[in-house]
Amino acid sequence: MASATVTRLLVGVMITSNVTPQHRARMRTVTTQALECGCDAKLLFFAGASNFDFASEIAEHKDIVQLDFPEKMNEGKTYRWFALANMLRSSFLFDAAFKMDADTSVDWCSLCRMVADAGAAAAASPDFYVGRLNEGERCGEMPNCPPDRCVDYSGRCWVYMSGGFYGMSASALGKLMVHPYTRLNSIGHEDIQVGRWFKRVLPDVRLVYADNGVVWCHNSAFHKSYPTGNVRQRWVDCSK
C-alpha cells in the first residue's frame, strides 16, 4: 500500500456539460467524509471537448481536467482517464484508481476498507480489479459480452466490471498502461474493453467485487441530493 496508515484513492468522475457546478460541489463535500475513517479520496472531474467553459471552476478548485477528445460514449474516454491516472502516480501516491459516473454515490469508508483489505492481501499479488462483476448474462448476452457463468479469467472465460463505478490497484494500472495491447484496444465499449485488457495483459489479477447498492450506488436518484450522514440509508433504487 502507498501508506501504512492512510488508504489513498484517485477517482476520475466522468462529466459532461450536463453535470452542474452545484452537483460537483456536493460531490466534493461528501467525499471529504473519507477522511473520518483514515482515507484520502481525491476526485478529479474528467471531461472531453465541449463548448462548456470550466475555466473559473478550474482556477478555484483545480480538480477538473478537460482534454481535446470527442465527448461521446465508446470513443476512448476511459482509456484516457486511466492513462492520465497512471501519469499522476508519481505526484499522488494512490493505492487504487477508479472510474466513476456522476450519477453514482459512494460509501467512502466502506470502499476504503475494501481497498485496504485488498492491499493487505498483496503478498499473494498486488494487482486487483474492483467493481460489480459482469459476465455474459449480466452483460446482456450480446456478441461482445463475456461467456455466461464466468467468474474469472481462467480458460476461455473473461469478465468485466460494471461501468458506473470500478477501479484497480496502482500496480495493476501501471502494468496495463505500459502494454501496447491496452492502447491499441482503447476504442470500443469502454468498460468491456477494460475487462479484455485484463484478459490479455493481466489474467491473474485478483477480482474484488460487490453488488451495486453495497459499497456504491449507481444510477440512483440519491446522487442528486448527496446529504451528509449514512449514505446507504437512502440507497433504495440502485440499478441491479
Image (tube, rainbow, N blue to C red):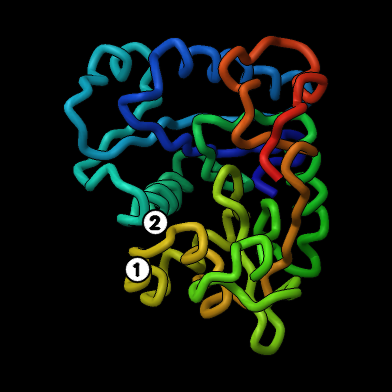
Quadrant of the drawing holding the C terminus: top right
Say which residue appears at 82% left-offset and 20% top-offset.
233
Marks 2 and 1, the one that precedes in the sequence: 2
Closer to the camera, 180 or 25? 25
Camera-side residue of 227 and 207:
227
Dot label at residue 183: 1
Q: Mark 2 and 1 residues: CB-CB less than 8 Å, in contact? A: yes
The Cα–Cα distance between marks 2 and 1, rounded to whole angstroms, is 8 Å
User: Where is 62 relative to 160, above or below?
Assistant: above
Where 51 sits versus 111, above or below?
A: above
The residue at the point 75 percent across, 26 percent down is: 235
SS type, badge 2: helix
Tell me if 201 is positioned left or right of 63 in this view: right
Identify the residue position indicated by label 2 in the image.
Answer: 79
Classify residue 210 as left or right of residue 83: right
Label 1 element class: helix
- In the rendered image, the residue lying farthest to the bottom is 155
* Disc 1 residue type (three-letter): Arg
Q: Residues within 10 Å of mark 2 (few under 14, many from 20)?
A: many
Instruction: Pinpoint residue 120: horizontal percent, then vertical percent.
Output: 81, 53
Label 1 environment density (alpha carbons within 10 Å; few <14, some 14–19, many ≥20)? some
Q: Residue at x 53, y 70 (%)?
A: 142
Please identify the quarter of the rendering in which residue 105 is found. top right
Task: Where is residue 118? Give x, y as percent.
Answer: 78, 53
